[in-house]
């Protein structure tokens, strides 16, 4: 038996009986194979039908489950949120209980404060409490500031940092100028070395006091009435009950008898004042520095007066005419030390040269002419302004001497021949045009 798959043929060689038997077997095999193929085709069709039905069932099931799942998910969320809320509340209660137990064992301290100065305790956005560690809380109520901390050291540190004081330093007008100094250098020096202190003049303090009063009234106002945007038409604005102490408060009510310090002396009456607000330790240090500066200036004036007296005595002993120095020079020396400036805008000098049409007078000699040996003894320490004036006077004298010498030489020199004038250059033409304009 030969099989040729290319031609799809089967060749059987043999006797008739054998060929019939073999051909029958081959036909039976092919028939069974055909039946199997038909069965497989029907099975595939059934499977495809089943898959289609399964897809339709899944679509219907999903649509039904979605509605059920929404209800289930909402119930789960509600249960989880309620559980979490209760858990958070329990934690907060436990933390509060622990904090109360710790606060009962913790260190406490308090100090009195004026209600207008509560803003200085916390600072802007509570910045003054950020760098303080070991504190539980800081409460300010009815003019009393209570501090609770883990250790007494932390509480003492917070007391030094947060204790605020307001002092009024009574001074004379001349003393205020000496404290400010030339170009406000002394007052800037005080601010740098006494940090946390605000220095306010007596003229500007009423405006600052009004701002403090407005801040206290805002704290008393309810939160929903503080901003204008939240004022609803149906909401009735609550009436603010401001106590009479705050409403009728005056700038002098901020200070007690101990807070007013008089540095004028017994003879002089106070005409001006400085207000110091800030940390208590730095305010006290600032007052001490102001006292030291005033003492230093007073001693310097006394020494300068002694020098003038000794100079006059030396002149009397030598038989020279005693003449007090010019008042303008002494005023310039005092102004240079006290920081007071010269004439301001709108003020005129008292000298005759400052008036219109007045002739400029030559600089007068402040002291009589003296021999060079005696002149060295008379030289005394002078201010920078006085030195500058003397230099200018010397320069003017030299210029006048040079002019007089030039005039004498011109008269003595022979008359030169007439020389034709030179042609003006471009630069000279431009200058003349500018002058004409």
Image: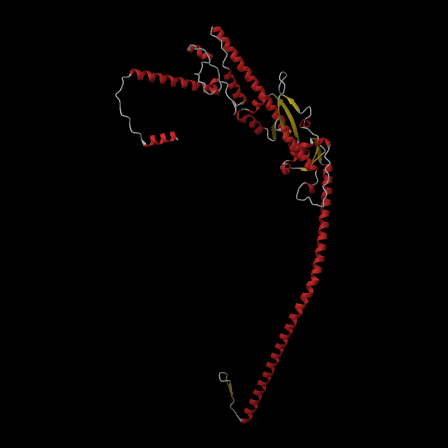
Residue 164 or residue 41, whichever sits in front:
164
Relative to 172, residue 207 above or below: below
Position of residue 237 measured from the top left corner of the image (x, y, whole percent):
72, 41
Position of residue 286 measured from the top left corner of the image (x, y, whole percent):
60, 26
Relative to 185, residue 97 above or below: below
Examine the image and state in which quarter residue 219 appears.
top right
Q: Can residue 137 be seen in the rendering of this structure?
A: no
Relative to 111, residue 234 above or below: below
The colour mode here is secondary structure
> Quadrant location of the C terminus?
top left
Position of residue 386 measured from the top left corner of the image (x, y, whole percent):
47, 19
Question: Outermost residue, bottom direction?
Answer: 16
Position of residue 150 measured from the top left corner of the image (x, y, whole percent):
69, 37
Residue 416 located left or right of residue 331: left
Q: Residue at x 69, y 61 (%)?
A: 69
Examine the image and state in which quarter residue 422 appears.
top left
């Amino acid at each position: 038996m030969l099989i040729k798959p290319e031609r799809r043929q089967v060749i059987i060689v043999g006797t008739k009986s054998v060929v019939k038997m073999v051909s029958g077997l081959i036909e039976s095999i092919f028939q069974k194979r055909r039946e199997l193929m038909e069965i497989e085709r029907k099975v595939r069709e059934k499977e495809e039908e089943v898959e289609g039905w399964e897809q339709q069932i899944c679509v219907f099931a999903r649509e039904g489950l979605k509605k059920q799942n929404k209800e289930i998910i909402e119930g789960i969320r509600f249960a989880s949120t309620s559980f979490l809320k209760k858990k958070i509340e329990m934690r907060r209660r436990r933390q509060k209980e622990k904090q109360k137990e710790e606060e009962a064992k913790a260190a406490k301290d308090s100090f009195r404060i004026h209600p207008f100065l509560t803003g200085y305790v916390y600072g802007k956005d509570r910045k003054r409490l950020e760098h303080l560690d070991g504190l539980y809380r800081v409460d300010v109520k009815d003019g009393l500031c209570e501090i609770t901390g883990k250790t007494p050291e932390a509480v003492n540190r917070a007391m030094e940092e947060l204790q605020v004081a307001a002092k009024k330093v009574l001074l004379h007008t001349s003393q205020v100028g000496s404290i400010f100094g030339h170009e406000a250098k002394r007052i800037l020096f005080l601010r740098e070395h006494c940090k946390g202190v605000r220095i306010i003049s007596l003229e500007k303090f009423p405006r600052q006091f009004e701002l403090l009063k407005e801040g206290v009234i805002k704290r008393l106002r309810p939160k929903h009435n503080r901003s204008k945007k939240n004022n609803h038409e149906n909401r009735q604005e609550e009436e603010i009950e401001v106590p009479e102490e705050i409403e009728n408060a005056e700038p002098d009510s901020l200070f007690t008898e101990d807070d007013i310090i008089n540095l004028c002396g017994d003879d002089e009456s106070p005409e001006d004042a400085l207000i110091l607000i800030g940390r208590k330790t730095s305010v006290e240090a600032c007052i001490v520095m102001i006292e030291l500066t005033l003492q230093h200036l007073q001693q310097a004036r006394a020494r300068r007066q002694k020098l003038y007296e000794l100079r006059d005595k030396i002149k009397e002993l030598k038989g020279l005419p005693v003449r007090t120095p010019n008042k303008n020079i002494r005023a310039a020396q005092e102004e240079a030390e006290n920081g007071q400036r010269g004439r301001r805008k709108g003020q005129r000098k008292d000298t005759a040269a400052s008036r219109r049409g007045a002739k400029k007078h030559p600089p007068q000699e402040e002291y009589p002419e003296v021999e060079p040996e005696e002149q060295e003894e008379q030289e005394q320490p002078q201010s920078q302004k006085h030195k500058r004036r003397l230099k200018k006077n010397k320069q003017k004298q030299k210029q006048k001497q040079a002019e007089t010498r030039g005039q004498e030489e011109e008269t003595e020199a022979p008359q030169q021949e007439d020389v034709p004038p030179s042609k003006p250059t471009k630069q000279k033409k431009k200058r003349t045009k500018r002058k004409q304009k």
